[in-house]
Amino acid sequence: MAVAWSNVSVVLGGRTVLDGFDLSVAGGSWLVVIGPNGAGKTSLMRTLAGTVAHTGTIRIGSEDAGGIPGRERARRLAVVPQHPVIPPGIDVFDYALLGRSPHQGLRFSPSERDRRQTLEVLHRLELGDFMDRNLDTLSGGERQRVVVARALVQDTPILVLDEPTSFLDLGHQLEVLELIAELRTERSLTVVSTLHDLAVAGQFADRMAVLDHGRLIAHGSPAEVLTPEMISNHWGVHAHTDVDEDGSVTVTVRRRQQA
Amino acid sequence: MMSSSTGAGVTGDRLAGSTGSGRSRLGGRWLSAGIASVLIAAVIGVATGPVPIPIWQVVLELLDRLPLIDVDSSLSPADRAIVWDLRAPRVVLGLLVGALLAGSGAAYQGVFRNPLADPYLLGIAAGAGLGATIAIVARLRDAVGFMDPVPLAAFLGALLAVAAAGTLSTRRGSTGSSATLILAGVAVANFFTAIQTFIQQQNSETLQQVFAWILGRLSTAGWGEVRLLAPYAVICVVGLLLSVGALDVLAVGEEEATTLGLKPRTIRRLILLVASLGAAAAVAVSGLIGFVGLVVPHAVRMLAGSSHRRVVPLSLLFGASFLALADVVARTVRAPAELPIGVITAFIGAPFFLLILRRQTLS
């Protein structure tokens, strides 16, 4: 399912954090939005999630998102937030089961089918042994997998991830992103994510967009976007980039001053 | 990485209806314990008093009232009158008030995701206090012959306070955040308390009457109070039981609840409406009984887990039995005098709560 922004702006506390954003994402592709801190990446994700007021129009599938009721929007698009709120004392199964909410009635009581789908996802993510564990007792990487599990349980064609790996070490970052890459292929998901780590971003994106001061600076394939000039102009960092055969880009960062 | 180990063993556990896993079975046990506690509290409440009535006779007498059951409790007509006209109404009132305070406390804590929230958070106590004070000071009891106007005045005052907090936190048709709502509630409560204190101070001859009302008491003259409370109790209990699922979704916060397809602000208003209606009705007939709405849901959460599917029904049940038993203590410790029940709930509740808290921290 495709996603498109058309002239979307967000003003927060009198400051324009997103300024006339225009971009479309084809169904089944992975758009990674990069940009320095405060560039407006999270606000951009929140425009999709429907949790921030904006001007301009957003299309989710073929419809204007403004006309899609909240519940239907939640059936099309699942969000992994940057700082998920974990209810105290909740166990892994119950947390993942929350992903079925948009498919339930007004009483939000889970059906047999809801439980079955939750189980399938937990096993798929190798969380089967964790089901009864309290989320507070999991490591950062395990917890992040559980949050991703909730989004997959939601069973939507679009996945929105805001810095899904921000608190993970390198190994766990790759593990979570590789999992999302596999699932994307498996379920033909459209993935829209932000990633602050350029080296990692260049490995997973098939489309990239650069955001700075709320404006779209560049977009295209990783090879088109991730150039030493771009990185130097917007991050103030000297970097070397290599384009691999599969189109992914390896970014090597250099120290600013040699000792 | 693909795994097909949706094994029947593990799967079966989680799929067996809404119960199944170890913790869910535990939930079922807690539910039985809650129902048992209500029955035990009811029997003890009816058996205890100046005229002792053996527990077995109380049990038989209560059983006799059930449809299709016909047993002889061999109670004298006088004892039977004591059971049905004096004690049963008071016990039932205690059960209802306790259930409503604890149930709405659980809902308030869930809606605001704040462990310190209780049903008095949005000004119910201050509003009810003002209403009752006005009714007492204006001697409406003498003016209105056929009914006691104090509960009605307290009920209206409580609803007025909550409505004011709700309206003041709403702007241009969009409802405010929960922080705005709490602050509006605090402001309204202070405003109402100021008026109440002023009126009270200007009419110091009614001070004792007002003070007695504020301390809270369960006193009944027949079934009148129960009848007053019953319709609101039904609305509140049904409403709360219908919202357990939504409360669980709200636990991930407003923003994430939105991305899960919920309208958090609308749902929050609806839940607060039914919870406040129940709490206001309870306060109107019993005065301000503290601690129940705060402690019972927490105790339940620590013992039986934090899902509202468990917390709400168990709070209703244990709140009911807790208050009915506290009332037994209130009317026996210094019989024939009665202690204010609010004193008892805090006196029993606080150490009990600390005990659970300690157990929780140590394990």
Image (cartoon, coloured by chain):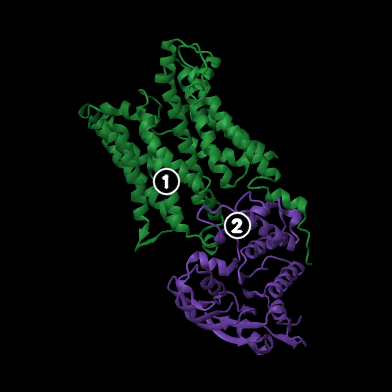
Chain colours: A purple, B green
- Residue B100 vertical position relative to residue A151 in the rendered view, above or below: above
Per the model, the C-alpha gap separating discs 1 and 2 is 24 Å
Question: Camera-side residue: B159 or A101?
Answer: A101
Task: For label 2, count other residues whose C-alpha is less than 10 Å away and answer few (under 14), some (14-19) or many (20+).
Answer: many
Residue B156 placement (x, y as % from top left): 31, 41
Residue at horizontal 47 percent and vertical 67 percent from the top: A69
Outermost residue, front direction?
B68
Residue A201 position by quadrant: bottom right
Can residue A221 be seen? yes
Amino acid type shown at disc 1:
Val
Residue A118 placement (x, y as % from top left): 67, 58
Specify the subunit that label 2 lies on: A
Left or right of A219? Residue B324 is left
Left or right of A117? Residue B147 is left
Residues tagged by mark 1 and mark 2 found on one chain of the structure = no
Question: Residue under circle 1?
Answer: B274
Left or right of A58? Residue A127 is right
Amino acid type shown at disc 2:
Leu
Question: Residue under circle 2?
Answer: A98
Could you tell me which secondary element the residue under label 1 belongs to? helix
Residue at horizontal 42 percent and vertical 38 percent from the top: B233
Specify the subunit that label 1 lies on: B
- Residue B48 vertical position relative to residue A98 in the rendered view, above or below: above
Residue at horizontal 67 percent and vertical 82 percent from the top: A206
Residue B202 placement (x, y as % from top left): 24, 33
Query: Pointers 1 and 2 in contact (CB under 8 A)?
Result: no
Task: For label 1, count other residues whose C-alpha is less than 10 Å away and answer few (under 14), some (14-19) or many (20+).
Answer: many
Question: Camera-side residue: B279 or A66?
Answer: A66
Outermost residue, left direction?
B143
Question: Camera-side residue: B61 or A176?
Answer: B61
Could you tell me which secondary element the residue under label 2 belongs to? helix
The quadrant in which the N terminus of chain B is found is bottom right
